[in-house]
Image (tube, rainbow, N blue to C red):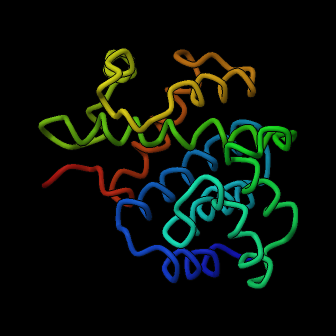
């Protein structure tokens, strides 16, 4: 499967603009991690793009992403990519064995926190967000309360990277580099 085919699947199953942008954010972060590790940027980006394609159809943690796997099989996604997508869910912890699995889990929630940090800035531009401002927001449990901070911490630990010195800066830079696509470049 190529990216164009994956994007068609996203557009078919995801109507929410914010969910599409989240999936694009995860794709950007996955591509950045793939580049860092010298891995296949396209396959890492593809699983990032598709990881939540079924959330609107299967909106519970008991269903998502497991019930989406048959759809992806029908559409021709290979089993290794499907396994990685399955590993990002709460019931997939035992299946997070590859670096790609761990990265998908690690970046998923963090992209939401970074997006929220950008949207509360007067400029609404992610390029104005700094790691220190994310760290400050991190401590405020009421801010972006839907972001599971334990998952973010666990994800960085699974990757063996420091949360604040490596993980957050890498994902933030990936999102800053793609601010227009992600809809967090502020207004002109």
Residue 137, quarter of picture: top left
Residue 4, quarter of picture: bottom right
Residue 183's x, y, as percent? 31, 57
Relative horizontal placement of residue 178, taking residue 117 as reference (left or right)? right
Q: How many marks?
A: 0
Residue 188's x, y, as percent? 13, 55
Relative horizontal placement of residue 86, taking residue 29 as reference (left or right)? right
The residue at the point 76 percent across, 48 percent down is 87
In the image, 59 versus 139, the foreground residue is 59
In the image, 9 versus 92, the foreground residue is 92
6 versus 151 height, above or below: below
Residue 52's x, y, as percent? 57, 61
The residue at the point 79 percent across, 63 percent down is 82
Relative horizontal placement of residue 172, taking residue 48 as reference (left or right)? left
Residue 135's x, y, as percent? 39, 17
In the image, 155 versus 55, the foreground residue is 55
The residue at the point 12 percent across, 37 percent down is 122
In the image, 129 versus 86, the foreground residue is 86
The residue at the point 43 percent across, 46 percent down is 177
Image quarter hosting the N terminus: bottom right
Relative horizontal placement of residue 145, taking residue 172 as reference (left or right)? left
10 versus 106 height, above or below: below
136 versus 50 height, above or below: above
């Amino acid at each position: 499967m190529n990216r164009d085919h994956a994007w068609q699947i996203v557009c078919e199953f995801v109507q929410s603009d914010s969910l599409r942008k989240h999936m694009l954010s995860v794709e950007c972060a996955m591509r950045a991690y793939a580049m860092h590790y010298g891995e296949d940027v396209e396959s890492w980006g593809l699983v990032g793009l598709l990881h939540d394609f079924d959330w609107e159809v299967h909106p519970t943690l008991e269903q998502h992403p497991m019930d989406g796997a048959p759809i992806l099989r029908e559409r021709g996604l290979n089993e290794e990519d499907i396994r990685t997508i399955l590993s990002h869910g709460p019931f997939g912890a035992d299946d997070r064995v590859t670096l790609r699995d761990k990265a998908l889990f690690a970046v998923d929630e963090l992209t939401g926190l970074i997006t929220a940090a950008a949207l509360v800035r007067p400029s609404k531009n992610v390029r104005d967000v700094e790691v220190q401002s994310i760290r400050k927001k991190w401590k405020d449990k009421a801010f972006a309360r839907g972001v599971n901070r334990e998952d973010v911490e666990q994800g960085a630990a699974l990757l063996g990277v420091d949360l604040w010195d490596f993980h957050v800066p890498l994902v933030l830079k990936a999102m800053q580099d793609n601010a227009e696509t992600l809809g967090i470049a502020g207004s002109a």
